[in-house]
Image: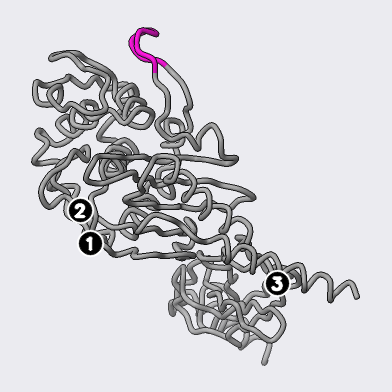
Amino acid sequence: MKKILALMGAVLLLSVSARAVEVSAPSALLMEKETGTVLFAKNEHEKLEPASVTKIMTLLLTMEAIDGGTLRYEDAVTASPHACSMGGSQIWLKEGERLTVDEMLKAVCVVSANDCAVALAEHLAGSEEAFVERMNRRAAELGMNDTTFKNACGLPAEGHVTSAYDIALMSRELMLRHPDIRTYTTVWMDTLRDGASSLVNTNKLVRFYDGTTGLKTGSTNAAGYCISATAERDGMELIAVILKGKTSPERFADAQTLLNYGFAAYALKTVVPDAPLPPVPVKLGTQATVQPILGEGNQLLLEKAQTGELGQSVTLESSVQAPVAVGDRLGTLTVTSGEEVLAELPLLAGEEVPRITFLQMLPRVLRIACLVE
């Protein structure tokens, strides 16, 4: 009886979640960050204007420079006449005004400051035009095939388009590879210029949706109301993209609908071997065995109905020939739910085992000869 009730509960949960996935926006997508799995899509490759959601790429390039060591949070950025002329959302930079990279990032993430986004772009590449070239190259590298950037901040420009799918790709890259961006994207209220400039986040989910980690809103008359919303619960982070929403409240409601569905229906499970993995014998190696380890990609995105009792089975090579390099495949860890195979994860060599040389082998041969005699 308990099993029947549990099964009915799981079915009810998924059916309720499925019915709830109705968004009013014409284009939307929900992605799980760790695996990149798309959980919901609606016209996800339609090329649309992204407005200030564009700034995700500007933030990504900035964070890549910081984490790559070519830019520091304390570096001063000088506002150019071009940056100060942006209009739209801004903190009203004055020509020649200097703020740190840290302050500029805060302004971009919290109040979507166009002037600061362009100032950062110019600081990194010398000009906004050169920075836009970098944006488009990076977009191509990420597989953002629906995207063409024309500026660094998202103000209306002919041919400046992307898609819900592409926005999810660059959002994932930013949140996955550069987690420090959350220092800025989770701020609800703050100040700049020694308290003279007040900042309130344009992303209302930061205050009102549990687990929100970011990321970026945007709106213009042509683009409508857009958002890439990220949130994390129970170790799983989701990315909900909404494009061309009719109103700001509908944009946030659509994003919450997608996030609620993802958190209700799915879970991220980290797979670890149930028992220690035995070493694999090595022929003609400098050591007799090599220790297998579970490779990367050991996090599985599962429907919650599948996360009960998971089974495991391990297959390993009976032996391998030296030399063995780190990362060489030694076997497979298979994860199952009942009769269904959920994943086949590689078991890899966790250490290098060189091939034994003649001089290294000689003592062994002599020892064996002595024992025979």
Which residue appears at 36% of the width and 39% of the height? 217
**In this picture, residue 305 sits left or right of residue 36:** right
Crowding around mark 2 (Cα neighbors within 10 Å: few <14, some 14 to 19, many 20+) is: many
Taking the magenta stretch, the answer to whether it contains residue 325 is: no
> Is 104 or 263 nearer to us in this picture?
263
The number of numbered badges drawn on the structure is 3
- Mark number, residue 11: 3
Region in magenta? 191-198
> Is 26 or 73 nearer to us in this picture?
26
> Is 372 or 242 nearer to us in this picture?
242
Percent x, y of residue 316? 61, 83
Mark 1 and mark 3: Cα distance apart in space: 36 Å
Q: Note whether 134 is above or below 21 in the view shown.
A: above
Q: Note whether 250 is above or below 166 in the view shown.
A: above
- Mark number, residue 146: 1
Which residue appears at 21% of the width and 57% of the height? 147
Residue type at mark 1: give it. Asp
| Callout 1–callout 2 Cβ contact below 8 Å | yes
Q: Which residue corresponds to mark 2?
A: 161
Which residue appears at 18% of the width and 26% of the height? 87
Q: Secondary structure at mark 1?
A: loop
Q: Earlier in the sequence, mark 3 or mark 2?
A: 3
Q: Earlier in the sequence, mark 1 or mark 2?
A: 1
Camera-nearest label, 1 or 3: 3
Percent x, y of residue 260? 58, 53
**In this picture, residue 349 sits left or right of residue 7:** left
Q: Quadrant of the N terminus?
A: bottom right
**In this picture, residue 238 sits left or right of residue 178:** right
> Is 339 or 250 nearer to us in this picture?
250
Mark 3 and mark 2: Cα distance apart in space: 39 Å
